[in-house]
Amino acid sequence: MKISVVVPAYNEEKLLGACLESVAAAFRAVGDPGLEHEVIVCDNNSTDATPRIAAAAGAKVIFEPVNQISRSRNAGAAGAAGDWLLFIDADSRLEAGTLRQLLSAVNGGRVCGGGAKVQLEDVPDLFGRLTVGTWNLISVIFTLAAGSFLFCRADAFRAAGGFSAALYAAEEIDLSRRLKRWGREKGLGFVILPGPHASSGRKLRLYKKSEFLRVLLLLVFKPWRALRDPGILKYLYDGRR
């Protein structure tokens, strides 16, 4: 079995190195001689040292000129050779324990994909902890994968059509639903692993609560507009790092 780890990256020179080191360390710790893996970093039109850091770490670097997370993930997947795809964010860290959970689910032969509970590091206050806790509850109840950790069979990804290029956010939720539908037709499940998968809590430090509240209100009352407008989703696309 071969797993392709796909990491979309836009101006991630501060945290990408640690992410790629964690991937290498997790696979070393698992130590399965029958397990192959590759790491693909999709440089999403970065203006910093992101592609150089990725290349220096031995990752395959693919360039995507349109600054959009779904396009970046799709471009990385298009260059992948693995039987399974694992999408993680450049500001996250892969833990060996979570990788073992993934392998156990995959080797059981009963799933087409899934996600994992997330854990944000250096979350600043109660607002941040409530945000993470609420998402993990939603993720488990409705079996929806977080964008920072989503895995699936490569053939399922292609059959489901990949991430929607019409969306600038929540593309992982949209794909989770389509993967579940594909899996049900073949008697395969979609699971949320206990994880946790560690990600940076930097966005909760860099952006004001009022900025998040504005986006939340737009997502509630005008979701189709908000999810398709990168100008509204500044916390994803304004390059603040």
Image (cartoon, rainbow, N blue to C red):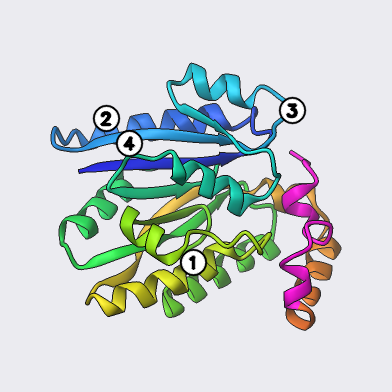
Q: Give me the residue at 71% from left, 50% from top.
A: 203
| Rendered-image quadrant of the C terminus | top right
- Residue 56 in sight from this viewpoint: yes
Examine the image and state in which quarter residue 160 appears: bottom left
Secondary structure at numbered mark 4:
helix
**Labels 1 and 4: the sequence-earlier one:** 4
Give the CA separation, mark 4 to mark 3.
29 Å
Mark 2: which secondary structure?
Answer: helix
According to the picture, the residue beneath numbered tag 3 turns out to be 47
> Are dots 1 and 3 in contact, CB under 8 Å?
no
Callout 2 environment at 10 Å: few (<14), some (14 to 19), or many (20+)? few
Secondary structure of the residue carrying tag 1 is: helix
Distance of label 2 from label 3 (alpha carbons):
32 Å
Real-space CA distance between mark 2 and mark 1, rounded to the nearest whole angstrom: 30 Å
In magenta, the rendered stretch is 223-241
Q: Is residue 165 above or below residue 43?
A: below
Q: Is residue 43 left or right of residue 2?
A: right
Q: Are marks 2 and 4 in contact (CB under 8 Å)?
A: yes
Q: Position of residue 114 (x, y in %)?
A: 37, 63
Q: Position of residue 212 (x, y in %)?
A: 78, 64
Q: Three-letter amino acid code at disc 3?
A: Thr
Closer to us: mark 1 or mark 4? 1
